[in-house]
Image: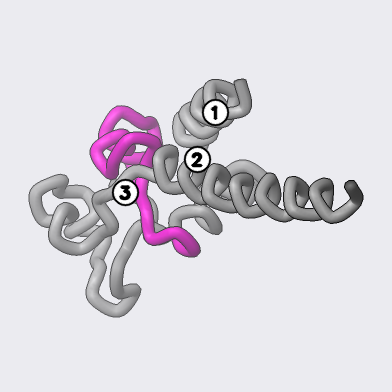
Amino acid sequence: QIKTNFESNLELALKDYNVTTDRHSEAVDTIQRTLHCCGVQNYSDWERTEYFSQRGIPRSCCKNQNDCSEEDLKDPNKAKLKVFVEGCFFLVTSTMESKMSVVAGISFGIACFQV
């Protein structure tokens, strides 16, 4: 349930992403920068957005901020070499799952000690 919810929220955030910093756009940037990912399933998700038609793929997808021009970001073939290609959805959910198993393991361990 969390996954489906997160996926549709991420897709909406991409669709509404804009240059003016709102909370969702900022969250998308943070996720992309931190996890080194781009888009929901992969970087090409951005090609279907309003933002892409104006500015290309967001800078937060760039592997190297100094080598990532707007011209590169507007051309999917060039962008592929300059941006993180992996989508954020899988990375975030797998990160959540690995953290959850740690949490579950710890709570199970604590429960056992109480017997």
Q: CA distance from mark 1 to mark 3?
A: 24 Å
The residue at which mark 1 appears reads as 3
Identified by mark 3, the residue type is Ile
* 37 vs 4: above or below: below
The 10 Å Cα crowd at callout 3, few under 14, some 14 to 19, many 20 or more, is many
The image's colouring method is: one colour
The residue at which mark 2 appears reads as 93
Sequence-first disc among 1 and 3: 1
Q: Is residue 54 magenta?
A: yes
Residue at the far bottom: name it.
66
Point out the image quarter for the N terminus: top right
The residue at the point 26 percent across, 59 percent down is: 83
Left or right, 11 with respect to 65, comes to right
- The percent coordinates of residue 61 (x first, y second) are 35, 57
Closer mark to the observer between disc 2 and disc 3: 2
The residue at which mark 3 appears reads as 57
Q: Which mark is residue 100?
A: none
Which is more toward the observer, 82 or 40?
40
Quick check: can you spot residue 65? yes
* Range covered by the magenta-colored residues: 33-55
Identified by mark 1, the residue type is Lys
The 10 Å Cα crowd at callout 2, few under 14, some 14 to 19, many 20 or more, is some
Q: CA distance from mark 2 to mark 1?
A: 7 Å
Q: CA distance from mark 2 to mark 3?
A: 22 Å
Residue at the far front: name it.
115
**Local SS, label 1:** helix
Sequence-first disc among 2 and 1: 1
Q: Do the numbered discs 2 and 1 sit on residues whose CB atoms are within 8 Å?
A: yes
Q: Residue 97 occupies which quadrant of the picture?
A: top right
**Local SS, label 2:** helix
Left or right, 22 with respect to 93, comes to right
Identified by mark 2, the residue type is Thr
